[in-house]
Each structure stands twice: as C-alpha cells, then as structure tokens.
Amino acid sequence: MARMMGDDALAAEFERLAGRWLNAFDESTGLLRDSTFYEGTKHNYSFRLVHDMATRIALAGGDDAFVALLDDFFGFGADAVVQPGVAPGLEEMTAGYALGRFEGLNNEPDMEAPWAYHYAGRPDRTAEVVHAIVNHQFGTGRGGLPGNDDSGGLSSWYVWASLGIFPVAGQSIFLLHPPSFHYSTVAMAHGTLTIDTSGFVEPTPGGAVQYIQSASLNGEALEGSWVDAAALHEGGRLHLSLGPEPSAWARDVRPPSWGPIKEVPA
C-alpha cells in the first residue's frame, strides 16, 4: 500500500522489518526458537503456513529435511501416543507436550500444518494426514469434535477438508487435496463451484487413503496443488481424478511464496 501511494522509503522500511520473521527460527533445528507459546509448543507453531514457504523450507535444510520434520511432527513411523485420561493432571499433560507432536487438531495452531507438505512437493502426505483427521477425529455423536469449536473454527476446518479445497489465511489461494465427497457444489462470490471426482471411493476410518492423480478447472489441467481464489470465486467445475496410490501430480510445481521484493536493475 505504501508503494502504491508513492512512499517508497516507508515501503522499504516495512520490507526490511517484515524480513525479521526469519530471526524467530533456529536453523540448527529447522524449528522456532524456544519461547513462550500459547496453548501449544514450538512444534505446533513451527508449521504454520507463512507467506514465504520457500524460504521457510530452505531454512530447515530443503525439501527432504522439511518433510522429515513434518513426518516426526505427525508421528509417521512412531509409536502411538498415549491419550490423556479423564481430567488429566499437570504431569500427564506435560509429558504429552514434551513429545512435540501434532495434537489431533484439538486447537487452532495445528489447523494449517497438514498442508505444509504441499510446499515441499508432497501433497500425498497431506492426503494421508487429512484422511486420518477427518475420519478419526470427527463424528456425529457425543464428543464429535476434537476440541473447542471456537467461533466455528473446527467445524469450518472440517467443511473445507471435506470439500477438498483449503483456503490459506491471508493469501488468495486454495490448496487442493482429496475430498470426502464424490460430488459437491458451493455458492461462490460470482457463481456456483462444482467439485466432482473420478475414481472416488467412500472414505472410512481405517480405510484406504486416496490420492489426486490429476486435476482440472473448467477443463484446463492444473499442474500445481493450488487454485487462485479469484478463479474459484467465478465458479465452474473443479475435477479431481483420484487413485489408490501416490502420483507425480504437483510434486514439482509448488504453491506460490512471497519473499522479499527484488529490485530490478535499470
């Protein structure tokens, strides 16, 4: 906004200050530095979707290192976590926090983390994590939400996760993943969006995970794992082709990252 108003000096100052988010991370661990975190640990907050995920991943040591951190966070290959009992005490909860693991979507800091895999070229991992959350953490009976539905936070997460499109807060993009329904329609700003699938298998707890094999919007192939929000708000048809095994779809075409503005030589 400052640049649009012609105040280049103020814009330059803000850009310099905005770059200081890097100082919050420890390059030796790829995680946030130790600090005081509200209703979570540094692990829960380390995988939020920042505006410059390309730099965030490079800071962690690259794609493979970042995926390894995420895998540890979500417990791939690890023993099952002992769940807290009724009215757990401080010692029990402290032991759980010390694991540095995903908390089962019981609170907002974990909401975006499954889609961090997209930025490292692993949308298949997102499919696995979202499938597990949707089918194990939500239900229609008592205790059907995994945590406090603050202002509709958890229930709206479920809606987006089930539709197969996840909005990135503060950015004009939706990230794509396998939906829970073979067909759905959504009233968007300028038209109706239809989301349909081929190869769909009804998801069940403990059942097989599906993976996107290809995607298209209004008949045009989508090579990346995201769609511009302006395009979706026009409505149309989003088609997702699904299969039982991970594919090469969107591994090499990453969602956009917004790093520091580079000055163009005169």
Image (cartoon, grey):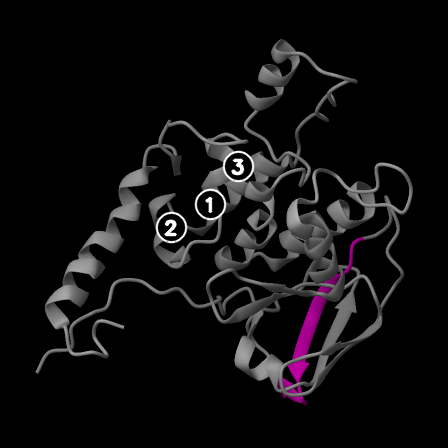
Q: Position of residue 167 (x, y in %)?
A: 58, 64
Range of magenta residues? 209-221
Separation of marks 1 and 2 at Cα, in angstroms: 9 Å
Q: Is residue 214 magenta?
A: yes
Q: Is residue 198 visible?
A: no
Q: Amino acid at mark 3?
A: Asn
List the residue tagged with mark 2.
56
SS at mark 2 in the image: helix
Q: Is residue 75 magenta?
A: no
User: Relative to residue 9, is residue 20 drawn left or right?
Assistant: right
The quarter of the rendered structure image containing the C terminus is bottom left
SS at mark 3 in the image: helix
Q: Quadrant of residue 14?
A: bottom left
**Tag 1 and tag 2, C-beta contact below 8 Å:** yes
Which residue lies most toward the front here?
A: 151
Q: How crowded is the residue under tag 2: few (<14 C-alpha within 10 Å), some, or many (20+)?
A: many
Sooner in the amino-acid sequence: mark 1 or mark 2: 2
Separation of marks 3 and 2 at Cα, in angstroms: 15 Å
Which residue is drawn at the image coordinates 55% and 72% (left, top)?
224
User: Relative to residue 126, is residue 230 drawn left or right?
Assistant: left
- State whether residue 36 is above or below residue 242: above
Residue nearer the viewer, 84 or 217: 84
Q: Amino acid at mark 2?
A: Arg
Mark seen at residue 44: 3
Residue nearer the viewer, 153 or 175: 153
Which residue is drawn at the image coordinates 61% and 35% (left, top)?
102
